[in-house]
Amino acid sequence: MKTLGETIVRTDFNAGKSTYVDMLKHRFAQLIDDVNVITPSVPEGGSLTPKGEAELARLKNEAIKHLEVAAMYAVKAQTL
């Protein structure tokens, strides 16, 4: 089963069979997966407020979105 990062950057698609494109896509996929599992440090036994949970989700989604865009431009630059 593919990870979220692998799905987003479509690591299985590489029309030109470029090893550098494969490397880029896998590195960006790993970064996306790393962002996806971020959990903030809270005091033991504590938890985020609903507002904090919403902000955490928003920040993670923004980071993932920008990593996806960066991956697309990096691949585009490599395949000119």
Image (cartoon, grey):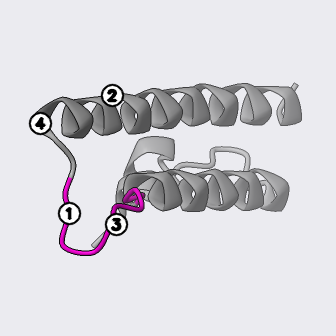
Other residues around mark 1 within 10 Å, as few (<14) / some (14–19) / many (≥20) = few
Q: What distance separates the C-alpha of mark 4 from that of mark 2?
A: 12 Å
Q: Which residue is mark 3?
A: 2
Q: Is residue 24 above or below residue 70?
A: below
Other residues around mark 2 within 10 Å, as few (<14) / some (14–19) / many (≥20) = few
- The disc placed on residue 46 is 1
Q: Is residue 16 left or right of residue 58?
A: right
**Looking at the picture, which amino acid does disc 3 mark?**
Lys
Question: Is residue 44 found inside the magenta-colored segment of the image?
Answer: yes
Would residue 29 be visible to someone looking at this image?
A: yes
**Looking at the picture, which amino acid does disc 4 mark?**
Pro
Main secondary structure of the magenta stretch = loop
Circle nearer the N terminus (3, 2) = 3
Residue at image position (79%, 54%) is: 18
Instruction: Tell me if label 4 and label 3 are in contact, CB under 8 Å.
Output: no
**Looking at the picture, which amino acid does disc 2 mark?**
Arg
Q: Which residue is mark 2?
A: 58
Choose mark 1 or mark 2, whichever is in front.
Answer: 1
Circle nearer the N terminus (1, 2) = 1
Choose mark 4 or mark 2, whichever is in front.
Answer: 4
Q: What distance separates the C-alpha of mark 1 from that of mark 4?
A: 13 Å
Q: Position of residue 34 (x, y in %)?
A: 51, 61
**Looking at the picture, which amino acid does disc 1 mark?**
Gly
> Which contiguous range is marked in magenta?
38-47
Label 3, secondary structure: give it.
loop
Choose mark 4 or mark 3, whichever is in front.
Answer: 4
